[in-house]
Image (cartoon, rainbow, N blue to C red):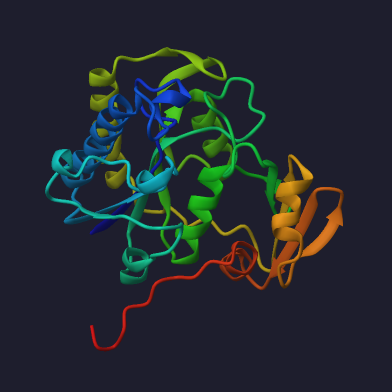
Amino acid sequence: MRVLIISDMEGVSGIVRWEQVSAGQPMYEEGRRLYTADVNAAIRGAFAGGADDVWVMDWHGAGGGYSFNSLIPEELDERCTYVVQERIPQYTGPLELGCDAAFLVGMHARAGTSDGIMNHTVFGSQWHELRFNGVLVGEPGVNAALCGAFDCPVVLVTGDEAVCRQTAELLGPQVLPVAVKQGIGAVSGVLIPPKRARRMIENAAAEAIGQLAGAKPYDPGRPCEIEVLFQNTRAFDDFRWRPGVEVAGERRIVVTGPDWWTAWKNFAEVSVYRPSSNG
């Protein structure tokens, strides 16, 4: 059984401030330790639940050489395989091999969520709303749609109460939520101590594997329309001239494809790595 863990930093236990998730900041190394420990808890749970192959993809853009590279290699559970990318999603190897389940670890709520700690959508200062076929989504929706494009269901989400609520609303009861904190502002919250939070993550990960039967991959619909409302005109200008992009109003663009993956690749100009036949 193969499990894919897609991880982000803002929803990790013990993390409430941007300084903990931004490369070069004094608190960033603390954030990396907390981040790696939460991911390790999910890895342990996956193996305890019956997985025999676990992959980890860091999806946190920390800045500089740490973008999608915030995990601490020496502290990672040695049983996993992990991916470092230059951009996301650049590599879909484990999904192409076939994944039985996906965990979303350390997720955050979408932009504009009043009780979402460090809430934002993809590019925090640029994107205001993201919709798939009219449905408002955040980054868990993007990750679930990516996994769904390869017939892999999401069965676990960890983060604050807001992102757990939003993910359950989107994907239904097949997703086990692990709320490790409650937002009381954009950079403040009521937190469960990390050691206890990690036990919760590990136990829920094992339970999620045990409840995998009947879990369905997320498909936003076919055809699929991706719509983005930007915060400002500069961000809007970055996308409005791309092939296949339709301007749908001030600061709003739409891209349509026969399915989500086709539409997303066109919209985000995704270039997926393919190994050469020569190895």
Picture quadrant of residue 241 = bottom right
Indicate left or right for 57 with 150 as reference: left
Q: Quadrant of the C terminus?
A: bottom left
Indicate left or right for 144 with 266 as reference: left
- Estimate the x, y position of residue 123 in percent, counting from the top left: 59, 43
Q: Quadrant of the N terminus?
A: bottom left
Determine the residue positioned at 39% across, 14% down: 191
Is residue 226 at least partly visible in the picture?
Answer: no
Number of marks: 0
- Estimate the x, y position of residue 7 in percent, counting from the top left: 37, 43
Determine the residue positioned at 39% across, 27% down: 25
Picture quadrant of residue 242 = bottom right
> Does residue 172 lie above or below 180 as drawn?
below
- Estimate the x, y position of residue 93 in percent, counting from the top left: 33, 68
Is residue 70 at least partly visible in the picture?
Answer: yes
Determine the residue positioned at 29% across, 24% down: 30
> Does residue 161 lie above or below 212 as drawn?
above
Q: Nearer the viewer, residue 270 or 110?
A: 270
- Estimate the x, y position of residue 95 in percent, counting from the top left: 36, 65
Q: Nearer the viewer, residue 154 or 25?
A: 25
Determine the residue positioned at 53% across, 66% down: 270
Q: Nearer the viewer, residue 174 or 120?
A: 120
Indicate left or right for 170 with 62 as reference: right
Residue furthest bottom in the image: 278
Picture quadrant of residue 162 = top right
